[in-house]
Image (spheres, coloured by chain):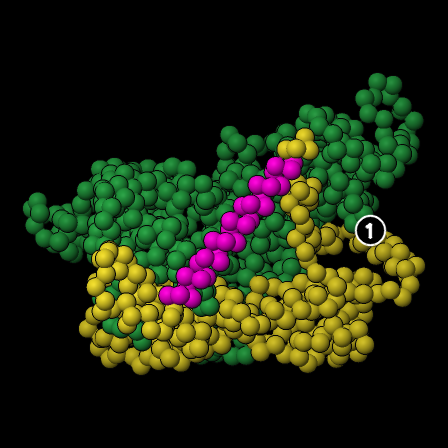
Amino acid sequence: MAEMEILDADITRIRAKIAALHAHRANLSTILLSQPHLPSRLQPRPVLHEGNHRDAAARAEVQLKRNTENVYRACAGITSFKVKDPDPYAVDNGNVLGVRIEVSIGGRFIETYSVLFNRQDTQSKHVLKIHKHTIPPCIPLQQLANKWLPMSTKDAGVAPEQNLVRFGKSLRKELVSWHLRLAAIRTLRAEAGVDEKPKPATEEAQKPVIGIVLNAFVSDDESEEEDEDAGEDTVQSRHGGSIRIASIEADAAAREVLITWTNQRIGVIKVAKDGTVEKAVVRGADGTAQSAMSRAALGRIEGLVQRLAA
Amino acid sequence: MAPNTKASVPDYRNIPHAHRVPVNHREVQRIFSKLSRQSLISLALQWLAKKNRDFCRPYLLGDNDAAEADEDEQYTPAQSLDELQEIYKQLAARKGGKREVQDRILEGDWRTGISMYQLATADIQYLLDHTNSLRWTAKRLARIPNAKSAVLDMEVTNDSDHLPRFQAQTFMANLARELTPLMKAHYLLTKIKTLPMTILRVYMHDSPYSTEASLAAEMGSSDSAKAVFFIWPNGSPFVYSSIANHLGQGIGDDGRHLRDIVQQAIPKAFSRPSARYQLAGTNFSTKSLEALLNYRGSGKSNAAAGGWSVFQDHSFSQNALDFITSQNEKSSARTQATAGAQDNTSSASAIPSMGRPTKHTLDSTQSSDSKRRRAVAEGRFGTSALPGDGQGLERIEVRIDDAFPQTPGGGPQAVDESNARTANHDRRKGRPSILDRSIAEVEELEDGEAWVPDVRVVFQGPHVFAGIRQLVEQGVVDGEEMPGWMTGEAGVTVAAVKGGRIQTKKGHELDV
């Protein structure tokens, strides 16, 4: 038995080593291919194997293109590209203009979004229409398109004024601020010590799939509800002073955050797109508003936990 | 418990979670017999958890007040809830049959009845265990345009909200207010941990009473489905609805009618003053929850289906700091797409094609037919439509709206009606479908010169688009001439096609 385990461990170690070496080789070849003068040095000399030479030149070319592309993407944030719609029935012979938006947070590029445009009407050359996109629905893409890329309405013939640059800018702003809000909420969770770490896969089977029941108290049995509330209160008061945040939940757009404390106190805060806490309501277990805390919550979303703890 | 359990007086209340139905009720038997052993144990443990105990009171030794100590009872009632929890944990730890647990629940610990809460959670558990068990229709909550605030609606500001706001308590109160005059119902609204969605189960009780006695009395009556499900994927304007009909159980007119009532109440419950919503169809229905979340979910995939799926992940645009080119050589088509992606700043060579085979044959020396076809399929379908990706659509229905070709090969319309597509068309006359032409459309067609027959194509199977992809790879369907809707890029399951393109209805905005 033990022998098997040792062998298994050996195999996994060797596999990991192979993967690491592969990555290292890819890295080295990239560095080599990115040498500034490589293309020119590959050019003139007659060589023994013409095939090898052509292969090398092609690889250097690919690498050069990739480098240029990446530099533009990393520095500009919004780049455009052209693709061909493979659909033989596509409008405008399948010419598609893509706009790519990079979102970088904390020193790394975390996501790339694309919007693909086509020209519905080949007459008006500059009127673009959104064809496909990968923007999540919590971003107001349609509203932005209505504003900056209006389509010609009933009185056709007059090409509407479209502003692709402003559209790209405002869309990027929406996307980046959304990711920043998501990151801010992750930070809040870490600060409050309620990190939702995914459990190891072995426990998956045991985990109940049904989450919080949202209408647990909508039942009409008033008396029962009160009884339970009272019961919870006494339990909590016995715990004494150790009141802390039990959970922080946010909606998908990270605009509304629900904070629950261990003593049944509940706070709902509304976050503007730029990360300011606009409105906040905190209520105790008995339903009374706690205005001091609500006021403390207003301000930037960063540091919310500290302000609420103070 | 409600004080007037015995007296049957019509009232205006919902059915509370704690109301119980007898264990031999048809719904109880049906739901419990479908669940697996593991799910049953997990459910029992949830019911015994502190926060749920009020809704799921088990039968304990102390409850045996009538001193009717049955000698032959199979399960001795437990002393306390904690003891019961221990029993179920032990059951979870060891292996055994599912019957053992089911009998213990129904004949032992909850012999006095299964509460509505238990019934609902059990039903949801089954739904999540078998995500292909029900047929779902996706709808979109669309804002009813308001003449006054039309300008405001378009504005995107720092604090504007374009999605309907979902506040569970307000929503439940509004929904109950809409529905209680029409029917008694039990609601369970819950968040799901494993999938990004909120689920609402409405158990419809067609009776003027909301008492336990009336719930139990219902068992003799109709056999149609009683519960409807609604699902909100988090952070999206969509709602999925379904009738919880069990295998072999018909959906009666009553069930359909009740579902429609609940469905009509939902946009009203979402609406606020100055922001009114309605449910708009999205021409999409399927059995697979995963597919729903992919085509009408909250992620990047809604409007980039089919071949455009390469834009969702990093197969088209690598990370902006990923400079390594040599590793991506696994699939030739993918590197082509990546290498071909040019900024408009780099040299203006020919526009790269995503899947046009001309390019592939040019620089691939290994152009055997099957490899080429596979490359074409890769270009048309991208990373989508792979068997086993769990996102299979099982039925696609399209109506071909092209004019009948006048003379063979005379004109571009004839080319449209090319090869395999016409092979399996099927004229359907029967129950009305949303594909039936409206009167206006029919008139429009009659005005025209050409004859446009009502031709419909239905694709059916466990994963339709994976099937078409395989047909392309095997050369049955010509991957280059195939219209785009056959790759699933339109993201609809019902559509009308004209000139090789999906027709969008007027006023239909982007399905975001």
B165 horizontally vs B325: left or right = right
Q: Residue furthest top?
A: B72
Q: A15 or B485, which lies in front?
A: A15
Residue A17 counted in the magenta span: yes
Letter of the chain shown green in the rendering: B
Answer yes or no: is residue A278 visible.
no
A29 horizontally vs A268: left or right = left
**10 Å neighbourhood of mark 1: few (<14), some, or many (≥20)?**
some
Quarter of the figure that contains the C terminus of chain B: bottom left
Q: Quadrant of residue B7?
A: top right
Where is residue A235 drawn, in percent x and y?
89, 56
Element type at mark 1: helix
Q: B384 or B62, which lies in front?
A: B384
Is B323 drawn above or below residue A160 in the view shown?
above
Where is residue B14 drawn, in percent x and y?
69, 49
Principal SS element in the magenta part? helix
Residue B506 counted in the magenta span: no
**Residue pointed to by mark 1:** A224
Q: Chain of mark 1?
A: A
Residue bounds of the magenta highlight: A5-33
Count of marks overlaid on the render = 1
Which residue is located at x 55 percent, y 34 percent?
Answer: B246
Which residue is located at x 83 percent, y 62 percent?
Answer: A263
Letter of the chain shown yellow in the rendering: A
B200 horizontally vs A263: left or right = left
Where is residue B175 drawn, in percent x and y?
61, 56
Q: Quadrant of residue B282?
A: bottom left
Where is residue A269 drawn, in percent x and y?
68, 72
B180 horizontally vs B115: left or right = left
Is B17 drawn above or below residue B74 in the view shown?
below
Q: A299 or B388, which lies in front?
A: B388
Looking at the rendered structure, the kind of residue marked 1 is: Glu
